[in-house]
Image: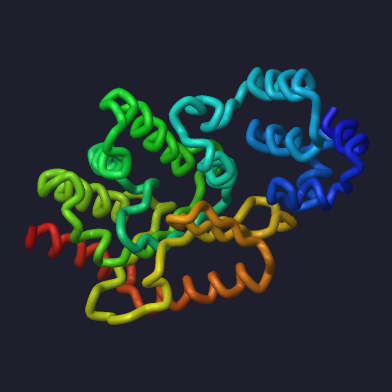
Amino acid sequence: MLKELRETSGLTIEQAGDAIRRSDSTISRIETGKRDAQVIEIKGLCEAYSAPADKTAELLGLARQAPAGGLWTAHEAAFPPTLETYLGLEEVARSLRVFALATVHSLVRTPATTHAILRAGLPTASEAEIDLLAEAHMARQGVLTREPVPAELEVVLDEAALRRPVGGRAVLLEQLDHLIHCAENVPNITLQVLPYDKGAHGALNGSFTLIDFPDPAEPQVVYCDTPGGNLYLQKPHDTRRFTQLYGRLCGAALDPTDSTEFLRTLRQEM
């Protein structure tokens, strides 16, 4: 059905991939049944193909009946539409390399930290809305324990993300304890701390995530969450630039062992 819709629209496989930020080989594998299509991919393709509403509804219905529904499907009512593309990428990623500047990254946050950050960003939302959204964000952490192969997560945390008392002292202490636990006990998580005394670095203007996929044919994606909207970069010169930047940040940061000790010392100071 997707292939028929694409051909009717006149788009090539490459153009379809560009429309939803996927490789042409991914579109080909979806059309030949060699790869399951995610709900967000179907929605994006149907929009790109100007598919009739009944066809779109039928395809989405089929996808949602699949045995393994995605995170977006389960929490569609909670997440804002602007996160839809990122969640789909995060859910199927082989590895995520993150630089976190102002706050601890969502995949290693505690529920209390998540709740406090959402409350600060959505001051007019009801408590029930915040609770629902916090629960949905915590569900994202399932990518780290999924079977059979959990995602690999590497995080460089700027010291600013660790000292800001999000939610108050008790919440911060719990968050630091959780980071220490992740660093010491979760083999697919690597944490590094970039201390203040390292001075200026190349990512002072914001956080970013490098996303890699199990299929080598799937291009790397760089995700930047900016005040002006979500930015996805996939051109080789962009991904190369951010990969090199991430390497410099890792080189400037404390190694994982010293980072864990830094977290312990910081907790004592608090």
**Which colouring convention does the figure follow?**
rainbow
Describe residue 236's horizontal placement relative to residue 268 as left or right.
right
Residue sitting nearer the eye, 266 or 221: 221
- Give the camera-side residue of 161 and 93: 161
Can you name the residue that lies furthest to the left here? 269
* Image height of 192 relative to 165, above or below: below
| Total numbered labels placed on residues in the image | 0
Q: Residue, x 20% and y 65% (percent of image)?
A: 261
Question: Residue 196: percent from the left, percent from the top?
Answer: 24, 75
Q: Which of 76 and 63 is in front in this view?
A: 76
> In which quarter of the view is residue 262 placed?
bottom left
Quarter residue 11 falls in: top right
155 to the left or right of 222: left
- At 24% from the left edge and 41% from the top edge, which residue is drawn? 116
Residue 55, percent from left and from top: 79, 22
Describe residue 43's horizontal placement relative to residue 172 as left or right: right
**Quadrant the C terminus occupies:** bottom left
Which residue is depicted at the point 60% across and 26% down?
A: 68
Q: 217 and 2: which one is in front? A: 2
- Using residue 7 as the reference point, say whether residue 238 is left or right of it: left
Q: In this view, does 130 lie above or below 199?
A: above
Q: Write the residue at 62% across / 52% down.
A: 213
Residue 258, x across and y down, in percent = 25, 70
The N terminus appears in which quarter of the rendering?
Answer: top right
